[in-house]
Structure formats: C-alpha cells, structure tokens
Image (cartoon, rainbow, N blue to C red):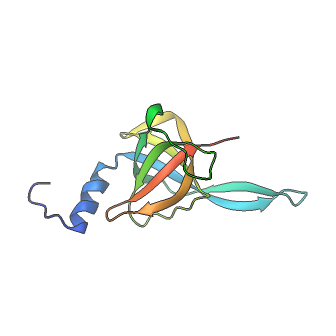
Amino acid sequence: MNGCPHTPDCLVSAYEAAMMDTCVILRFSGAEDDCGVPVASYEESAPTRCLFGQIAASERYRPEATMSEVVAKLRLPLGTALERRDRVRITHRGGRALERPLEYAVEGDPRELPALLAVDLAEVRP
C-alpha cells in the first residue's frame, strides 16, 4: 500500500482487491408446505466477490448457546446484505470455478468492520 494513506477508503480498496473468491448469497425465505408446516427455502443473489478461508480443525470453535461449529470465515464488501438465517455458496476460489460449490450456514450475526463485513460460517446440517 505504498503511497496510500491509512484512510477508511484506502482500507476498503485494499480489502476489496484481496477478495479473489466468488460466492452467492442464499437469502432465507420461509415458506409453508401443503400441510402448513414451515419450510426453509432460499433465493440466490447475484454472484459477489468475497474472501473465503477455512479454519483448521484445531482452531474451530462453538459460539455460546449453539450446537454449530464455526468451520470457515468469510469477508464481504461493505454494504452486502446478509442475515443470520441466510446461507452462502462458494462458487470460485482464486478465480477458478469449484467443481462442487461449498455451501455454509451463517453462524451468528455478520459483523461490520471499518473496511469489510466479517462472517462466521458453519457446515450446513441436513
């Protein structure tokens, strides 16, 4: 970051330049089946750039009052709409399409930091 002052705009630009992965946000939309039982369904967003990282088994953790284990971290551009009931599908890593996209549940509330949106991810349970 030579010649770039440590300003919020500069930090945002630096983080966004590092986001070389692609994901699709799966927005939760509740529905009911024929018997009136709530069923989770998801609507896909347009692809968005992101920075995805899996967590080593020795560093994984369980947030309080949950059975889910945080297995990955995701960084998204500021302003990305994401809620705790949504899911995320990683479709590209380092610009290359994944043969089998990876799907994760959002664990807890996404955290807005000065230059990015930080998200903990858990494995999707059937």
- Residue 39 in view, yes or no: yes
In the image, residue 1 above or below residue 95? below
* Residue name at image x 72 percent, y 61 percent: 30
Nearest the eye: 96 or 85: 85
Q: In this view, does 48 lie to the left or right of 18?
A: right
Image location (x, y in percent) of residue 29: 68, 61
* Residue name at image x 14 percent, y 54 percent: 1
Image location (x, y in percent) of residue 117: 41, 60
Image location (x, y in percent) of residue 48: 44, 54
Q: How many marks?
A: 0
Nearest the eye: 90 or 109: 109
Q: What residue occupies the far right of the structure in this picture?
A: 35
- Residue 56 in view, yes or no: no
Q: What residue occupies the far left of the structure in this picture?
A: 3
Image location (x, y in percent) of residue 50: 40, 51
In the image, residue 66 above or below residue 85? above
Q: Classify the position of the C terminus by image quarter.
A: top right
In the image, residue 72 above or below residue 32? above
> To which quarter of the image does residue 84 belong?
bottom right
* Residue name at image x 34 percent, y 46 percent: 20
